Image (cartoon, rainbow, N blue to C red):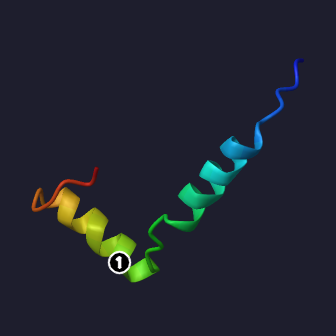
């Protein structure tokens, strides 16, 4: 198996993407799924 080394720039971009992700509570996740099942909103 081949190891790939990541450049410092790739690590910075990955850290930024991780920090800017949305965090949803359990209640919000349930609401989103129910809205999708009722076809009121897109889950994507």
Residue nearer the viewer, 21 or 32: 21
Q: Is residue 1 above or below residue 44?
A: above
Residue nearer the viewer, 11 or 2: 11
Q: Which residue corresponds to mark 1?
A: 28
Left-right relation of 16 to 1 = left
Label 1 neighbour load within 10 Å: few <14, some 14-19, many 20+: few
Farthest-out residue, top: 1
Quarter of the rendering containing residue 8: top right
Instruction: State the residue at coordinates (67%, 42%).
Output: 10
Quarter of the rendering containing residue 30: bottom left
Q: How many marks?
A: 1
Farthest-out residue, left: 40
Residue nearer the viewer, 32 or 8: 8
Left-right relation of 42 to 2 = left
Instruction: State the residue at coordinates (30%, 63%).
Output: 33
Q: Position of residue 35 (x, y in %)?
A: 19, 66
Q: Position of residue 4 (x, y in %)?
A: 82, 27
Instruction: State the residue at coordinates (38%, 82%).
Output: 27
Residue nearer the viewer, 38 or 19: 19
Q: Position of residue 32 (x, y in %)?
A: 28, 67
Left-right relation of 13 to 7 = left
Q: For the N terminus, which image quadrant?
A: top right
For numbered disc 1, what is the local secondary structure? helix
């Amino acid at each position: 198996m081949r190891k790939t080394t990541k450049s410092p720039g790739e690590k910075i971009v990955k850290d930024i993407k991780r920090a800017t992700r949305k965090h949803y509570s359990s209640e919000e996740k349930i609401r989103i799924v129910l809205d999708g099942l009722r076809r009121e909103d897109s889950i994507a």
